[in-house]
Image (spheres, rainbow, N blue to C red):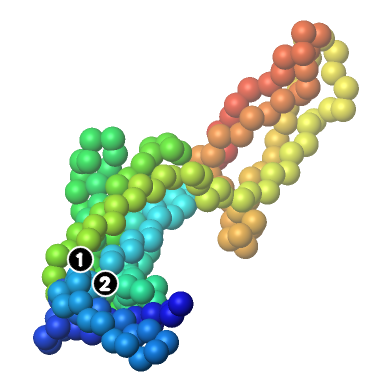
């Protein structure tokens, strides 16, 4: 029994979009068989879109589409940047507020900001091309999972350590931004509690820091 060896030979000049191929099989005794026009080869790149909306911050409550657009080579799986392409975005669930971003030479992009009101908002990104270089569509959804919080430091003290029923206790303190050289944080809500009552409920109130 012989084991055939096969190779594909393009029939005519190959093109980026694909070419008609002949298949030649040679067995261990040197017998050669050729089938003409056996199929086609696709040499175009397959688009691969990878992106996210980032993490909105306390002082910048916007989602910004950012990521890369690459072309995956058939067979090898190697990736090359798809530069100068337009990636489209919209807000879900209704695909509103359409925007777009153009890829750089390395395939990276950054889109326009989308205001975010709450964690869980979703956005849709898509890219489509049908050319001699790339063919296909890649679409994905990105969600806002969390905010980047503001880290602050709070110091507080009461004007007495013990209080009788009906007495007033005054709590004073300061809220500063630990990442901004201890700058005061103004107009910020702070919950002040003196503990819990007999039913386990917190005894306290929410106050607002001074604006300076």
Q: Write down the residue under mark 1.
A: 135
Q: Which residue is mark 2?
A: 45
Q: Which residue is more in the foreground, 102 or 190? A: 102
Q: Is residue 131 left or right of residue 106?
A: left
- In contact (CB < 8 Å): disc 2 and disc 1: yes
Q: Is residue 138 above or below residue 93?
A: below
**What residue is at 24 percent from the left and 57 percent from the top?**
137
Relative to 177, 10 lies left or right: left
What residue sits 31% from the left and 81% below the top?
A: 25
Q: Is residue 203 above or below residue 141?
A: above
- Callout 2 environment at 10 Å: few (<14), some (14 to 19), or many (20+)? many
Q: Please, what secondary structure does the residue beneath circle 2 have? A: loop
C-alpha separation, residue under disc 2 versus residue under disc 1: 6 Å
Dot 2 or dot 1: first in sequence order is 2
How far from the left and from the top, in percent, is residue 162?
88, 22
Position of 20 with respect to 122 (left or right) is: left
Q: Position of residue 119 (x, y in %)?
A: 45, 39
Residue at 12%, 87% in the rendered image: 13
* Disc assigned to residue 190: none
Residue 100: horizontal and vertical position, in percent? 21, 58
Q: Relative to residue 131, is residue 96 depicted above or below?
A: above
Furthest residue in direction bottom, as rendered: 30
**Residue farthest toward the front in the current orientation of the protein:** 1
On the image, which quarter does residue 122 sit in?
A: top left
Up the image or down, 212 lies above or below 29; here it is above
Q: Residue at x 26, y 72 (%)?
A: 45
Direction from residue 201 to residue 66 in the image, left or right = left
């Amino acid at each position: 029994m012989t084991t055939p060896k096969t190779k594909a030979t393009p029939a005519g000049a190959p093109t980026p979009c694909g070419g008609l191929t002949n298949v030649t099989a040679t067995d261990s005794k040197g017998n050669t068989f050729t089938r003409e026009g056996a199929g086609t080869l696709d040499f175009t790149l397959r688009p691969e879109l990878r992106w996210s909306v980032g993490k909105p911050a306390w002082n910048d409550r916007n989602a910004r589409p950012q990521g890369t657009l690459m072309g995956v080579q058939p067979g090898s799986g190697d990736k090359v940047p798809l530069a100068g392409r337009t990636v489209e975005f919209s807000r879900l669930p209704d695909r509103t507020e359409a925007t777009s971003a153009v890829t750089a030479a390395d395939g990276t992009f950054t889109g326009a900001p989308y205001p975010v009101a709450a964690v869980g908002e979703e956005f849709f990104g898509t890219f489509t091309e049908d050319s001699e270089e790339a063919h296909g569509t890649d679409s994905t959804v990105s969600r806002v999972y969390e905010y980047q919080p503001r880290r602050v430091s709070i110091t507080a003290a009461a004007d007495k350590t013990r209080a009788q029923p009906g007495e007033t206790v005054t709590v004073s303190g300061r809220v500063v931004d630990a990442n901004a050289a201890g700058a005061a944080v103004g107009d910020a809500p702070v919950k002040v509690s003196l503990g819990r009552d007999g039913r386990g409920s917190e005894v306290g109130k929410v106050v607002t820091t001074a604006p300076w």
